[in-house]
């Protein structure tokens, strides 16, 4: 409960991005409130892993299905 948490601009009013960071760990939650699929573009980059599907993600361009969500954890270099 001592992690920093904030809302981040996902570039689309239909998509909420919640960021959480503690020490070296960072997670992003993307929530698509539209019935249409959305693609979001984020300026930060980095390699993340989908925490549910375990696939690697390029967060600079991320496809989110309609009414879908993605929890992503930043991959450290040694992972």
Image: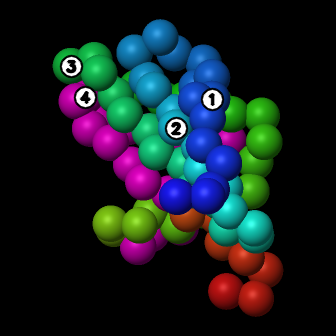
Looking at the image, tell me whether mark 2 or mark 1 is earlier in sequence order. 1
Which class describes the residues within 10 Å of circle 3: few (<14), some (14-19), or many (20+)? few
Q: Indicate which disc, 4 or 3, sits on the residue closer to the N terminus.
A: 3
The residue at 68%/62% (across/down) is 22
Under tag 2, what secondary structure? Answer: strand
The CA span between labels 3 and 2 is 20 Å
Furthest residue to the top?
13
**Circle 2 residues within 10 Å: few <14, some 14–19, many ≥20:** some
Question: Residues under labels 1 and 3: Cα distance?
Answer: 21 Å
- Residue identifier under label 4: 66
Give the number of the disc on residue 8: 1
Q: Would you identify the image quadrant in which residue 36 lies?
A: top left
Quarter holding the C terminus? bottom right
Q: Mark 3 points at which residue?
A: 35
Give the Cα separation between the discs numbered 4 and 2. 18 Å
Q: Does the magenta stretch include residue 74?
A: no
In the rendered image, is residue 47 in sight?
no
């Amino acid at each position: 409960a001592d992690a920093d948490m904030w809302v981040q601009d996902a570039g689309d009013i239909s998509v909420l991005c919640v960021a959480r960071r503690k020490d070296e760990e960072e997670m992003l939650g993307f929530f698509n409130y539209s019935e249409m699929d959305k693609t979001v573009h984020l300026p930060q980059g980095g390699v993340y892993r989908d925490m549910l599907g375990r696939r690697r993600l390029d967060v600079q361009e991320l496809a989110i299905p309609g009414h879908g969500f993605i929890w992503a954890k930043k991959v450290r270099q040694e992972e």
